[in-house]
Image: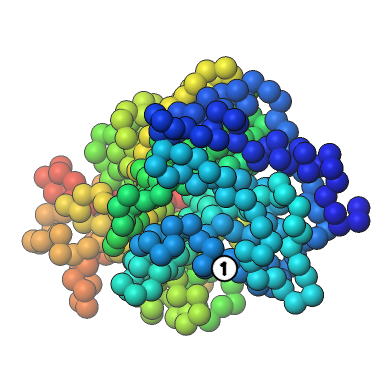
């Protein structure tokens, strides 16, 4: 390959990127997004066509790609309160994405032009039409009224991420997960975006056409900025094939080390993670906290439920002293909470934890798996709200877990082979004498010693000390809830231990 795009590849790219004639102009009725759904349905009736190969002229290394800066003067909706900047193609981002601007009910393609970007020294972006972008990012004055900060970006497969006010990028979301954790995982891609010109200074609407070997679909996003960044999501899915291992509202994060997992790294920092736990609010109203771990082997935990009220990956440790990292500032990473809209029926919240020895790879995945597979030829609709925030919007009436620590019970080993856990609960929500509190604890394997409770002198938090004894290498799941007169005082603490 000589670095140029061949005519066949160029025509194929243009066919994938171009909008249909029916979408070129929507006037006089105006654009609604249903037009894209019709295009996705038609696309699902045809075989999946992968993106054309990345030409040599777009093969940038990491540092070169970072130099591809979009010229702010070319941004969509400049100088409005929210502006959109397309992302350069190339590097790790090999799938071309079309950008279409929607204003006053009419659709206008936003064509790729290499002069829109600064290029690295000695390199230039190719100028052939049909190349497309790699994604789009949005900026608004979310922290200071005189500075536009990036608050959301869509780039890479069907991934996107956002920040809340005062936070830094951390975990990511994506449109859909297929076969996650299995040998045949798929990563559908955004083929095109339709960006509606904001009518309000804090809201932007985005429509994304998703395509993959097993499905097509349209994801409609209404994104609001503020102290939290909130995505209202409506998805319309057209399966090409029967899909059993599907994950809705998926998200990915990183957990390398922390006090809730066995220490395996020679690192000066006490913790390294973008998220420290799974928070779940079940359909029955139970509130669950499951600390994340960096396991020695792949772990999959499934929390069966019907009509969940919410779930997400949280970053509860919010002090610099929790990490002591003056560069990464993990204390400023956002949490992500999924609020289902409507009744989702039976299924399970599934948590996948993968081993990792570095902090640059996402090794945590969370999603909702419906009980029934998606059938080819049918249409599926789902809706939910994503809260990118510092804390979940779940009720705070119950005492929450503030800290979890684990280790051998004595001098690096335990004479009886037990594993010790110290779980701290918010003391301000547990008033009165501890003698009146019952520690309701259970394990799926092995035995637990009677739980002891104490109140920490510095914070007033209540510490529950557990000791688990289990034989063999199979995992043991431990649950603990603090109760008084049978009534829950705390959320349910859940953890998994494998020797």
- Left or right: 487 as drawn, with respect to 176: left
Task: Tell me residue 325's x, y (percent).
Answer: 48, 79
The colour scheme used here is rainbow
Q: Is residue 9 above or below residue 154?
A: above
Is residue 397 shown to the viewer in this render? yes
The residue tagged 1 is 71
Q: Which residue lies furthest to the top in this view?
A: 377
17 versus 448 height, above or below: above
Is 316 in front, or is 58? 58
Classify residue 206 as left or right of residue 199: right
Q: Is residue 116 above or below residue 178?
A: below
Tell which of 201 and 308 is nearer to you: 201
Q: Residue at x 64, y 35 (%)?
A: 212
| Residue drawn at point x = 20 percent, y = 53 percent | 396
In this view, which residue lies farthest toward the left? 432
The residue depicted at 64 percent of the width and 60 percent of the height is: 88
Where does residue 79 sit, x and y in percent of width and height? 41, 65
**Crowd class of label 1 (few under 14; some 14 to 19; many from 20; radius 10 Å):** few
The C terminus: image quadrant: bottom right
Q: Looking at this view, is 131 or 166 the one in front?
A: 131
Element marked by disc 1: loop
Q: Residue 182: x percent and y percent?
A: 64, 39
Q: In this view, does 30 lie above or below 485?
A: above
Residue at image x 47%, y 82%?
326
Is there any visible trace of residue 193 in the rendered image? Answer: no
């Amino acid at each position: 390959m000589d670095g140029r795009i061949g005519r066949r590849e160029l025509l194929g790219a243009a066919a994938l990127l171009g909008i249909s004639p029916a979408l070129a102009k929507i006037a006089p009725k105006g654009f609604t997004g249903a037009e894209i759904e019709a295009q996705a349905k038609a696309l699902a009736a045809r075989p999946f066509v992968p993106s054309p190969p990345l030409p040599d002229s777009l093969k940038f290394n990491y540092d070169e790609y970072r130099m591809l800066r979009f010229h702010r003067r070319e941004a969509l909706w400049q100088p409005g309160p929210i502006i959109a900047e397309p992302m350069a193609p190339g590097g790790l981002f090999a799938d071309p994405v079309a950008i279409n601007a929607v204003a006053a009910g009419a659709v206008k393609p936003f064509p790729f032009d290499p002069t829109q970007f600064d290029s690295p020294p000695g390199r230039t972006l190719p100028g052939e039409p049909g190349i497309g972008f790699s994604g789009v990012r949005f900026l608004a004055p979310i922290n200071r009224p005189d500075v536009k900060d990036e608050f959301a970006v869509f780039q890479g497969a069907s991934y996107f991420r956002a920040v809340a006010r005062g936070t830094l990028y951390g975990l990511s979301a994506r449109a859909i997960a297929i076969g996650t954790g299995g040998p045949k995982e798929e990563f559908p891609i955004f083929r095109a975006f339709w960006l509606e010109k904001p009518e309000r200074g804090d809201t932007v609407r985005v429509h994304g056409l998703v395509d993959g070997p097993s499905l097509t679909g349209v994801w409609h996003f209404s994104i609001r900025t503020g102290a939290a960044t909130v995505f209202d999501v409506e998805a319309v899915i057209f399966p090409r094939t029967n899909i059993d291992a599907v994950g809705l509202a998926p998200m990915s994060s990183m957990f390398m080390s922390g006090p809730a997992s066995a220490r395996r790294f020679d690192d000066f920092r006490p913790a390294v993670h973008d998220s420290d736990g799974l928070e779940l609010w079940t359909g029955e109203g139970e509130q669950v906290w499951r600390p994340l771990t960096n396991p020695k082997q792949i772990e999959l935990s499934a929390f069966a439920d019907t009509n969940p009220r919410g779930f997400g990956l949280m970053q509860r440790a919010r002090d610099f002293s929790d990490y002591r990292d003056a560069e990464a500032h993990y204390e400023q990473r956002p949490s992500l909470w999924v609020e289902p809209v409507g009744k989702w029926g039976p299924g399970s919240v599934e948590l996948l934890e993968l081993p990792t020895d570095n902090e640059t790879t996402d090794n945590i995945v969370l999603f909702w798996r419906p009980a029934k597979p998606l059938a080819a030829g049918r249409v599926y609709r789902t809706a939910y709200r994503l809260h990118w925030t510092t804390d979940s919007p779940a009720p705070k009436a119950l005492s929450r877990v503030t800290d979890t620590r684990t280790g051998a019970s004595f001098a690096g080993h335990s004479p009886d082979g037990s594993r010790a856990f110290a779980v701290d609960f918010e003391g301000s929500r547990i008033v009165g004498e501890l003698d009146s509190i019952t520690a309701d604890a259970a394990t799926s394997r092995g035995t637990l010693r009677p739980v002891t409770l104490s109140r920490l002198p510095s914070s007033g938090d209540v510490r529950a000390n557990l000791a688990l004894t289990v034989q063999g290498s199979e995992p043991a799941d431990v649950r603990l809830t603090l109760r008084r007169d049978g009534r829950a005082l705390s959320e349910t603490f859940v953890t998994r231990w494998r020797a």
